Image: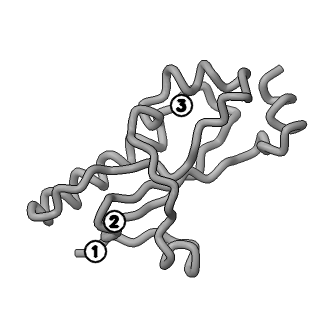
Amino acid sequence: MSKFLNLVSHDYASSHEYLYSNGSGNFFISEIYLKSTDDYDRGFEQVSYLYKQYRAKHKEDTTPLYRNFRMDLWKFWNWRRYAISKCYRLPYKREIPLEYRNTGSYRINN
């Protein structure tokens, strides 16, 4: 039922792009999440791992990781995902880095 509602509401059931960035704008990455799976945190675990690697190299950058995608609370069929998935525990930051919007790829400064 939730897949049908996502399709009808233009939240396409095949995939959805989840974007993350840190406060300084030196780290941003996208996660392609396949909604056909029940493992909500599979892609987020990879994002977390890469962010930990970035933080290990850049100890001076203490900004947190943000999610750049919102929760649409009116989509009640997604409430289970909002409650369970770890990515929704991150603070929300609406701004998507300009470089990401221009290139459509992730960047991690070395």
Identify the residue shown where x is 58% and y is 25%: 81
Could you tell me if the residues under marks 2 and 1 are in contact, i.e. CB atoms within 8 Å? yes
Residue at the image position 47 percent from the left and 34 percent from the top: 88
| Mark 2 neighbour density, 10 Å: few (under 14) some (14–19) many (20 or more) | many
Q: Decide if residue 58 is on the left or right side of residue 31.
A: left
Which callout, 1 or 3, points at the residue further toward the start of the chain?
A: 3
Q: Is residue 72 above or below residue 56?
A: above
Q: Residues within 10 Å of mark 1 (few under 14, many from 20)?
A: few
**Left or right placement of residue 14 versus residue 33 in this view:** right
Q: Which label is found at residue 27?
A: 2
The kind of residue on which mark 2 rests is: Phe
- Amino acid type at image mark 1: Asn
Q: Which mark is residue 40?
A: 3
Q: Position of residue 24 (x, y in %)?
A: 29, 66
Q: Report the front residue among 3 and 74.
A: 74
Q: What type is the residue that disc 3 sits on?
A: Tyr
At horizontal 39% and vertical 39% (from top left) the residue drawn is 90
Callout count = 3
Q: Nearer the viewer, residue 40 or 67?
A: 67
Q: Spatial distance from mark 3 to mark 2, Cα to Cα?
A: 22 Å
